[in-house]
Amino acid sequence: MAEPRGEAAPEARAPVTGEQFPCAQCGAKLRFKPGSDAIRCDYCGHENPIPKRPWTQIEEQDLEQGLEKIESTAATEEKRTVKCQSCAAEFTFDPHVHAATCPFCSSPVVAETHTVRVIQAAALVPFELDDKAAQGAFRKWLGGLWFAPNDLKKFAVTEGRLAGMYVPYWTYDAQTYSAYDGERGDAYYVPYTVTKTVDGKTVTETHQRREIRWTYVSGNVERFFDDVLVVASKSLPKKYADRLDTWRLSSLQPYREEYVAGFRSEVYQVTLKEGFVEAKGRMEDQIRSDVRSDIGGDEQRIHNISTQWQDLRFKHILLPVWLAAYRYRGKVYQILINGQTGEVEGARPYSWIKIALATAAAAIVIGVVIWLVGKGR
């Protein structure tokens, strides 16, 4: 949530030109030190504090205006980027590096940079985990995998080099007022008898049949949605990116180049409109849940929901992710590590030999138990 809201124009910033921050002691290139308010020299260890600025609000912009004429309502900037020909990821690149490996798919990338114009990020969450802490989280995650190939941990740590990446997200706010009508179902039980033959004798049993009494209902619910988060990357496996949800957005800082120094940032591939379609669907799911709770009873039937959407706002933010992409037996596996909390999500291979052996062992145990039970009768 960005507080307080206001109509002040966003802080003017020069287009990104690949400018580096020089070390005050030796003149080498500096990079942001995760978990601090400083940029650090990897050569001499000297730290330059990030200068304090007067407090600047994180501005959220009007969504309806943005969807109608995004180019004229949202602040934009130019970024020098490189595009991976294998997975289509597009991200910023050090202009002094001519070749490297794509952090999303581990394919070789030649640094043929080009310039794109994108909506400026209003804010970011700075990295809190450095590469050593992220590697520790990665190792711990690997060590907890069941049925993984024996050589996976050693291979993944060796081949899966971590890359710090600021990943683009959209956030959406909305105040909703929903009128509904439907039916409330209250359960009751009706006794009935069943006659059957047991051991040659006729037995009558009484059972209970569950019935529902339906009553027409109508009402209203309202909810304010704050910072509904939608990942704006198509380069990350969505099911894992969506699970990477332990963000503390209270740590958002107004965008500053110093926080990005030494890290890459991905250019968003999900448009503002596409992101809102996803966010609105999730809001509508929550509204339906609110309606069911408001109807009450044991079961609910919803006939109609009419929602008024007000105070729609958005912002473009960057969140820190450590990426590891490694190839194992010809297949690429991607690992995502939350650069703020250390949460790990990702794909992994399975050892079908281990699974087969475990299945066989379980079958043997079940067979022994059945034999022992039969023997004891």
Image (tube, helix red, strand yellow):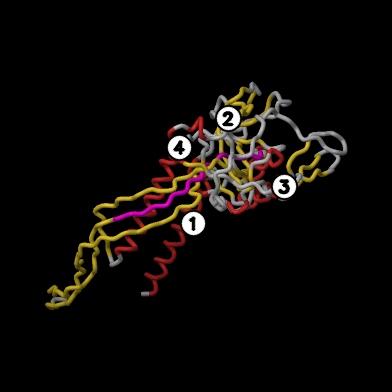
Amino acid type, label 2: Glu
**Earlier-in-chain disc, 4 versus 1:** 4
Residue 361, label in figure: 1
Q: Residue at x 61, y 24 (%)?
A: 115
* C-alpha gap between disc 3 and disc 1: 39 Å
**Earlier-in-chain disc, 2 versus 4:** 4
Residue 132, label in figure: 3
Residues 346 and 112: in front is 112
**Earlier-in-chain disc, 2 versus 1:** 2
Count the marks.
4
Please, is residue 359 above or below residue 316 in the view? Answer: below
Residues 153 and 53: in front is 53
User: Which region of the structure is painted magenta?
Assistant: 163-179
Q: Of discs 2 and 4, which sits in the foreground?
A: 4
**Is 46 positioned to the left or the right of 317 in the image?**
right
Residue 65, label in figure: 4
